[in-house]
Image: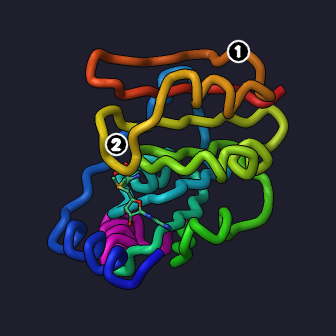
Amino acid sequence: MAERDRDVWDARHEGADPEPTAPFGADHLPAPSVGTHCLDVATGSGVVALWALDRGMHVTAVDISRVGLANLASTAERRHPDAPLRVVEHDLDDGLGVDGAFDLVVCRWFRDPALYDALVAAVAPGGWLSIAILGGDGPFAGTAEELVEGFATLGPPIAAFSDERGHRALFHRAG
Ligand SMILES: C[S@@+](CC[C@H](N)C(=O)[O-])C[C@H]1O[C@@H](n2cnc3c(N)ncnc32)[C@H](O)[C@@H]1O
Protein backbone atom coordinates (compact mmCIF):
# COMPACT_ATOMS: atom_id res chain seq x y z
CA MET A 1 0.00 0.00 0.00
CA ALA A 2 1.20 3.46 -0.82
CA GLU A 3 2.09 5.68 2.12
CA ARG A 4 -0.53 8.23 1.10
CA ASP A 5 -3.26 5.54 1.20
CA ARG A 6 -2.25 4.76 4.76
CA ASP A 7 -2.55 8.48 5.52
CA VAL A 8 -6.09 8.42 4.12
CA TRP A 9 -7.04 5.55 6.43
CA ASP A 10 -5.32 7.21 9.39
CA ALA A 11 -7.35 10.36 8.75
CA ARG A 12 -10.58 8.34 8.56
CA HIS A 13 -9.87 6.67 11.90
CA GLU A 14 -8.77 9.90 13.61
CA GLY A 15 -11.00 10.63 16.62
CA ALA A 16 -13.02 7.41 16.24
CA ASP A 17 -14.66 6.11 19.38
CA PRO A 18 -15.19 2.43 18.44
CA GLU A 19 -18.29 0.66 19.70
CA PRO A 20 -18.14 -3.15 20.00
CA THR A 21 -19.95 -4.65 17.00
CA ALA A 22 -20.76 -8.31 16.38
CA PRO A 23 -19.53 -9.68 13.04
CA PHE A 24 -21.97 -11.22 10.58
CA GLY A 25 -23.15 -14.65 11.77
CA ALA A 26 -22.17 -14.15 15.40
CA ASP A 27 -25.59 -15.37 16.56
CA HIS A 28 -24.57 -18.84 15.30
CA LEU A 29 -21.57 -18.99 17.62
CA PRO A 30 -21.80 -21.17 20.67
CA ALA A 31 -21.35 -19.46 24.03
CA PRO A 32 -19.14 -19.08 25.93
CA SER A 33 -16.11 -18.12 23.86
CA VAL A 34 -13.82 -17.35 26.81
CA GLY A 35 -10.21 -18.20 26.05
CA THR A 36 -10.74 -18.93 22.37
CA HIS A 37 -8.82 -17.03 19.70
CA CYS A 38 -10.16 -14.48 17.25
CA LEU A 39 -8.35 -12.94 14.28
CA ASP A 40 -9.81 -9.65 13.04
CA VAL A 41 -8.38 -8.84 9.62
CA ALA A 42 -8.39 -5.14 8.64
CA THR A 43 -9.69 -4.31 12.08
CA GLY A 44 -9.77 -0.52 11.56
CA SER A 45 -10.54 1.05 14.95
CA GLY A 46 -11.42 -2.43 16.14
CA VAL A 47 -15.19 -2.56 16.54
CA VAL A 48 -15.22 -6.35 16.01
CA ALA A 49 -12.05 -6.87 18.03
CA LEU A 50 -13.71 -5.08 20.97
CA TRP A 51 -16.80 -7.27 20.64
CA ALA A 52 -14.54 -10.35 20.78
CA LEU A 53 -12.69 -9.03 23.84
CA ASP A 54 -16.07 -8.48 25.53
CA ARG A 55 -16.72 -12.20 24.97
CA GLY A 56 -13.46 -13.10 26.69
CA MET A 57 -11.64 -14.07 23.52
CA HIS A 58 -7.94 -13.58 22.85
CA VAL A 59 -7.76 -11.21 19.93
CA THR A 60 -5.22 -10.61 17.18
CA ALA A 61 -6.08 -7.51 15.16
CA VAL A 62 -4.34 -6.61 11.89
CA ASP A 63 -4.46 -3.31 10.01
CA ILE A 64 -2.22 -0.85 8.19
CA SER A 65 -3.55 2.17 10.10
CA ARG A 66 -1.56 3.14 13.19
CA VAL A 67 -4.37 5.51 14.18
CA GLY A 68 -7.00 2.78 13.94
CA LEU A 69 -4.87 0.34 15.92
CA ALA A 70 -4.17 3.00 18.56
CA ASN A 71 -7.91 3.65 18.90
CA LEU A 72 -8.50 -0.05 19.40
CA ALA A 73 -5.68 -0.42 21.93
CA SER A 74 -6.74 2.56 24.05
CA THR A 75 -10.44 1.61 24.02
CA ALA A 76 -9.58 -2.00 24.88
CA GLU A 77 -7.36 -0.85 27.75
CA ARG A 78 -10.21 1.27 29.15
CA ARG A 79 -12.76 -1.53 28.89
CA HIS A 80 -10.55 -4.49 29.78
CA PRO A 81 -7.22 -3.61 31.41
CA ASP A 82 -4.66 -6.30 30.52
CA ALA A 83 -6.92 -7.54 27.74
CA PRO A 84 -5.44 -10.41 25.70
CA LEU A 85 -5.08 -8.21 22.63
CA ARG A 86 -2.30 -8.27 20.04
CA VAL A 87 -2.33 -5.49 17.46
CA VAL A 88 -0.34 -6.08 14.27
CA GLU A 89 0.52 -3.18 12.00
CA HIS A 90 0.80 -4.85 8.63
CA ASP A 91 0.14 -4.26 4.94
CA LEU A 92 -2.30 -6.94 3.82
CA ASP A 93 -1.02 -6.49 0.25
CA ASP A 94 1.88 -8.63 1.53
CA GLY A 95 -0.32 -11.48 2.83
CA LEU A 96 -2.14 -12.06 6.09
CA GLY A 97 0.84 -11.19 8.27
CA VAL A 98 0.07 -13.63 11.09
CA ASP A 99 0.59 -17.35 11.54
CA GLY A 100 -1.45 -19.89 13.39
CA ALA A 101 -5.03 -21.07 13.52
CA PHE A 102 -7.91 -19.16 15.09
CA ASP A 103 -11.30 -20.23 16.40
CA LEU A 104 -12.93 -17.25 14.71
CA VAL A 105 -11.57 -15.35 11.70
CA VAL A 106 -13.34 -12.12 10.78
CA CYS A 107 -12.80 -9.89 7.79
CA ARG A 108 -15.40 -7.12 7.65
CA TRP A 109 -15.58 -4.45 4.97
CA PHE A 110 -12.17 -5.15 3.55
CA ARG A 111 -11.87 -7.11 0.35
CA ASP A 112 -8.86 -8.74 -1.22
CA PRO A 113 -9.54 -12.01 -3.09
CA ALA A 114 -5.80 -12.73 -3.00
CA LEU A 115 -6.22 -13.31 0.74
CA TYR A 116 -9.15 -15.74 0.59
CA ASP A 117 -7.01 -18.91 0.71
CA ALA A 118 -5.00 -17.50 3.62
CA LEU A 119 -8.21 -16.64 5.47
CA VAL A 120 -9.46 -20.21 5.04
CA ALA A 121 -6.11 -21.58 6.21
CA ALA A 122 -6.24 -19.38 9.32
CA VAL A 123 -9.44 -21.04 10.59
CA ALA A 124 -8.78 -23.80 13.13
CA PRO A 125 -10.57 -27.14 12.61
CA GLY A 126 -14.10 -26.63 13.88
CA GLY A 127 -13.58 -22.87 13.84
CA TRP A 128 -15.63 -20.14 12.20
CA LEU A 129 -15.15 -17.59 9.47
CA SER A 130 -17.15 -14.40 8.99
CA ILE A 131 -16.55 -12.34 5.88
CA ALA A 132 -18.42 -9.26 4.73
CA ILE A 133 -17.79 -7.05 1.72
CA LEU A 134 -19.42 -3.89 0.54
CA GLY A 135 -21.42 -3.43 -2.62
CA GLY A 136 -21.20 -0.54 -5.06
CA ASP A 137 -18.13 0.61 -6.92
CA GLY A 138 -15.70 1.23 -4.08
CA PRO A 139 -12.37 -0.54 -3.59
CA PHE A 140 -13.91 -3.11 -1.24
CA ALA A 141 -16.87 -4.01 -3.45
CA GLY A 142 -17.21 -7.55 -4.81
CA THR A 143 -19.77 -10.01 -6.10
CA ALA A 144 -21.73 -12.78 -4.42
CA GLU A 145 -20.13 -15.32 -6.79
CA GLU A 146 -16.67 -14.20 -5.78
CA LEU A 147 -17.41 -14.86 -2.13
CA VAL A 148 -19.13 -18.19 -2.73
CA GLU A 149 -16.29 -19.44 -4.94
CA GLY A 150 -13.57 -17.95 -2.74
CA PHE A 151 -14.73 -19.91 0.31
CA ALA A 152 -16.14 -23.03 -1.37
CA THR A 153 -13.50 -25.26 0.23
CA LEU A 154 -15.28 -24.68 3.56
CA GLY A 155 -18.49 -26.19 2.16
CA PRO A 156 -21.88 -24.51 2.17
CA PRO A 157 -22.09 -21.45 4.45
CA ILE A 158 -24.11 -21.62 7.64
CA ALA A 159 -25.48 -18.19 6.89
CA ALA A 160 -25.39 -15.82 3.93
CA PHE A 161 -26.52 -12.26 3.46
CA SER A 162 -26.95 -10.01 0.48
CA ASP A 163 -28.93 -6.85 -0.10
CA GLU A 164 -29.95 -4.65 -2.99
CA ARG A 165 -26.96 -2.38 -2.43
CA GLY A 166 -24.68 -5.34 -3.12
CA HIS A 167 -23.45 -5.85 0.41
CA ARG A 168 -22.47 -9.51 0.88
CA ALA A 169 -21.57 -11.65 3.86
CA LEU A 170 -20.90 -15.31 4.55
CA PHE A 171 -20.50 -17.25 7.78
CA HIS A 172 -18.77 -20.62 7.60
CA ARG A 173 -17.67 -23.40 9.89
CA ALA A 174 -14.47 -25.28 9.08
CA GLY A 175 -15.01 -29.05 9.08
C1 LIG B 1 -13.76 0.03 5.77
S1 LIG B 1 -12.48 -0.22 6.99
C2 LIG B 1 -13.15 -1.62 7.88
C3 LIG B 1 -12.66 -1.64 9.31
C4 LIG B 1 -13.28 -2.72 10.18
N1 LIG B 1 -13.09 -4.06 9.64
C5 LIG B 1 -14.74 -2.47 10.45
O1 LIG B 1 -15.56 -3.35 10.17
O2 LIG B 1 -15.08 -1.39 10.95
C6 LIG B 1 -11.18 -0.95 6.02
C7 LIG B 1 -9.87 -1.12 6.81
O3 LIG B 1 -8.93 -1.77 5.97
C8 LIG B 1 -7.64 -1.25 6.25
N2 LIG B 1 -6.78 -1.49 5.10
C9 LIG B 1 -6.97 -1.07 3.82
N3 LIG B 1 -5.99 -1.54 3.03
C10 LIG B 1 -5.15 -2.24 3.84
C11 LIG B 1 -3.94 -2.96 3.62
N4 LIG B 1 -3.38 -3.03 2.39
N5 LIG B 1 -3.36 -3.57 4.65
C12 LIG B 1 -3.90 -3.50 5.90
N6 LIG B 1 -5.05 -2.83 6.18
C13 LIG B 1 -5.66 -2.22 5.15
C14 LIG B 1 -7.87 0.24 6.51
O4 LIG B 1 -6.84 0.81 7.29
C15 LIG B 1 -9.22 0.20 7.25
O5 LIG B 1 -9.02 0.20 8.63
Q: Residues within 10 Å of mark 2 (few under 14, many from 20)?
A: some
Give me the residue at 65% from left, 26% from top. Answer: 172
Pinpoint residue 52: horizontal percent, then vertical percent.
Answer: 49, 48
Residue 74 appears in view: no
Q: Which mark is residue 21?
A: 2
86 left or right of 24 in image: right
Q: Nearer the viewer, mark 2 or mark 1?
A: 1
Quadrant hosting ligand 1? bottom left
Looking at the image, residue 122 lies above or below residue 128? below
Looking at the image, residue 94 lies above or below residue 140? below
Q: Tell me the residue that label 1 is attached to.
A: 156
Pinpoint residue 29: horizontal percent, then vertical percent.
Answer: 58, 27
Inspect the image, locate mark 1, and give the three-letter code of the amino acid beneath it.
Pro
The main secondary structure of the magenta stretch is helix
The reply to whether the residue tagged 2 has its Cβ within 8 angstroms of ligand 1 is yes
Query: Which of pointers 2 and 1 lies earlier in the amino acid sequence?
Result: 2
Magenta stretch: give its range: 67-84
